Image (tube, rainbow, N blue to C red):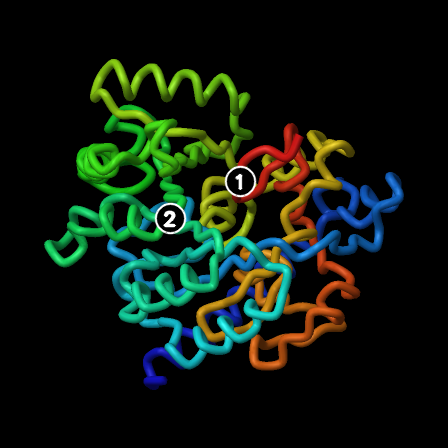
Amino acid sequence: MSIKSLSRQQHELARAEKQVGILDDYESIGIPSFQQKLENIGLFPLKPTNLEIFQINVGKMCNQVCKHCHVDAGPDRTEIMTRDTMEQILEAVKGSEVQTIDLTGGAPEMNPHFRWFVEELSALGKHIIVRCNLTIIVANPKYHDLPEFYKKHKINVVSSLPYFAARRTDAQRGEGVFEKSIRALKMLNEVGYGNPDSGLKLDLVYNPSGAFLPGDQQELQGEFKQKLWDMYEIVFNDLFAITNLPISRFLDYLITSENYEEYMTELANAFNPMAAPGVMCRNTISVSWDGYLYDCDFNQMLDMKLENAPQHISDFNLQQIHNRPIRISQHCYGCTAGAGSSCGGTTT
């Protein structure tokens, strides 16, 4: 690892520690602890149900810089998962009940070992999700064949599209992103993605553009489907409405815009005891680009590694993972507010 990368890592760790401190200071804004909410409904300590999903961050390098990105990904990030770490993951999932591998980044496709990793996972018979930012497909000729590659391995493509119009999408994800996203969606449609008869699943992700909760997921899905078909003849399968969690860039935004206290209060007031049992940390393990293990990718960004369980993929132990307590903090309100929120959309 370069000195530059090490320096960036040290900065990220210091920032994560500072953000955990901000989140832990919940009494000053007059909201209860998330732990207390779980205790009130008999769900503390929060424990895993079963391990179904490995969500793997294969690197923070990305061709975009999105305002809501909780990974702080961008073109200047040099953290990339090595092939050695990928081989350790393959060894871990071979002997486990894990059926779904969820690949994310950054733009996961920018990892030089991405296609090899997908091929190896596919050979194991795993269901593979790739969280594609869409613009990577049209960013460079070497990525133009990604739709065919995804099709070959029956990848479930999950892509962020904040809105069905350019202004709001570009405001959140960068100038020109909407137009490139539409081109990429058309390329995916051309090989069969989004067609219900093709078996090739294309899902979209909606994040609110500000300090508020997402609207009803089914209503948003219907609106997106109608607008994207009417304007561009684009089809997709499902839309996931995901709450912006108060960490990383979004927490920075909340503080600088003086929306932090109001947003945290809104999340706490919207706590849904029916959503809490379905939070994704109960059936998912998050793996960082350097192989460390977390209860979810949000904990990963706060450097909250697994507790009472192996903390690195090289020491993976399924029984200890099953028996661990899940680490929580105030940002967890984001997953239990309203209809709930996970990487697969609402939980209720």
- Asked if residue 266 can be seen in this view, the reply is no
| Left or right: 21 as drawn, with respect to 48 | left
Amino acid type of the residue that numbered disc 2 sits on in the rendered structure: Ile
Q: Which of marks 2 and 1 is nearer the N terminus?
A: 2
Q: Residues within 10 Å of mark 2 (few under 14, many from 20)?
A: many
- Asked if residue 294 can be seen in this view, the reply is yes
Q: Which residue is drawn at 57% across and 75% down?
A: 313
Tell which tag, 2 or 1, sits nearer the viewer: 2
Q: What element carries label 2?
A: loop
Q: Name the residue under label 2.
A: 155
Q: Name the residue under label 1.
A: 344
Q: In which quarter of the image is the N terminus?
A: bottom left
CB atoms of marks 2 and 1 within 8 Å? no
User: Does 98 sit above or below residue 266?
Assistant: below
Q: Quadrant of the C terminus?
A: top right
Residue 251: which numbered mark, if any?
A: none
Structural distance between the alpha carbons of marks 2 and 1: 15 Å
x%, y% of residue 314? Answer: 57, 81
x%, y% of residue 167? Answer: 25, 28
Q: Residue at x 56, y 61 (%)?
A: 286
x%, y% of residue 52? Answer: 62, 54
x%, y% of residue 228? Answer: 29, 21
| Left or right: 13 as drawn, with respect to 62 | right
Amino acid type of the residue that numbered disc 1 sits on in the rendered structure: Gly
Q: Which residue is drawn at 42% across and 56% down?
A: 104
Q: Which residue is drawn at 49% across and 71% down?
A: 90
User: Does 337 sit above or below residue 136?
Assistant: above
Front-most of residues 149 and 284: 149
